[in-house]
């Protein structure tokens, strides 16, 4: 696991890991890079600081028995009342 996407991408490209997780940018991403899963679980609190906007909260569960990630979204972002 690493905080920054550029380091996570380099680790995934190296092929030495089954799964590499990162999260600094709060943007949901699940991608296969060679044999490695590259995962950014998104914004669990539902806010993207770079965009200054609310987004649908998300996270990723990795099933180690099946070797597959599953994205979980927690609903639409809150909008203005009314």
Image (cartoon, grey):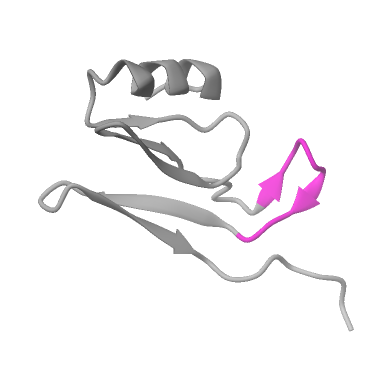
Task: Spot the residue most to the left.
Answer: 65
Please identify the quadrant where the N terminus is shown. Answer: top left
Task: Spot the residue most to the bottom.
Answer: 82
Verify whether residue 54 appears in magenta. yes
At a point 60% along the width and 51% down the height, the residue shown is 45
**Magenta extent:** 47-56
At a point 43% along the width and 62% down the height, the residue shown is 72
Give the x, y percent position of residue 63.
Answer: 20, 52
Residue 41 visible: no
Please identify the quadrant where the C terminus is shown. Answer: bottom right
Q: Is residue 22 left or right of residue 47?
A: left
Q: Is residue 49 left or right of residue 6?
A: right
Decide: is 65 above or below 56. above
Give the x, y percent position of residue 39.
Answer: 41, 39
Q: Nearer the viewer, residue 35 or 53?
A: 35
The prevailing secondary structure element of the residues shown in magenta is loop
Give the x, y percent position of residue 52.
Answer: 82, 43
Q: Nearer the viewer, residue 33 or 48?
A: 33
Q: Tell me where residue 78 sits by quadrant.
A: bottom right
Decide: is 5 above or below 47. above
Q: Tell me where residue 48 sits by quadrant.
A: top right
Decide: is 17 above or below 68. above
At a point 54% along the width and 50% down the height, the residue shown is 44
Verify whether residue 3 appears in magenta. no
Q: Is residue 74 left or right of residue 25?
A: left
Decide: is 72 above or below 62. below
Residue 80 visible: yes
At a point 22% along the width and 18% down the height, the residue shown is 16
């Amino acid at each position: 696991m690493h905080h920054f996407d550029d380091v996570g991408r380099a680790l995934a490209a190296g092929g030495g890991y089954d799964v590499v997780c990162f999260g600094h940018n709060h943007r949901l991403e699940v991608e296969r890079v060679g044999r490695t899963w590259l995962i950014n679980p998104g914004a669990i609190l539902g806010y993207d600081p770079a965009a200054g906007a609310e987004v649908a909260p998300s996270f990723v569960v990795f099933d180690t028995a099946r070797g597959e990630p599953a994205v979980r979204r927690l609903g639409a972002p809150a909008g203005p009342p009314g």
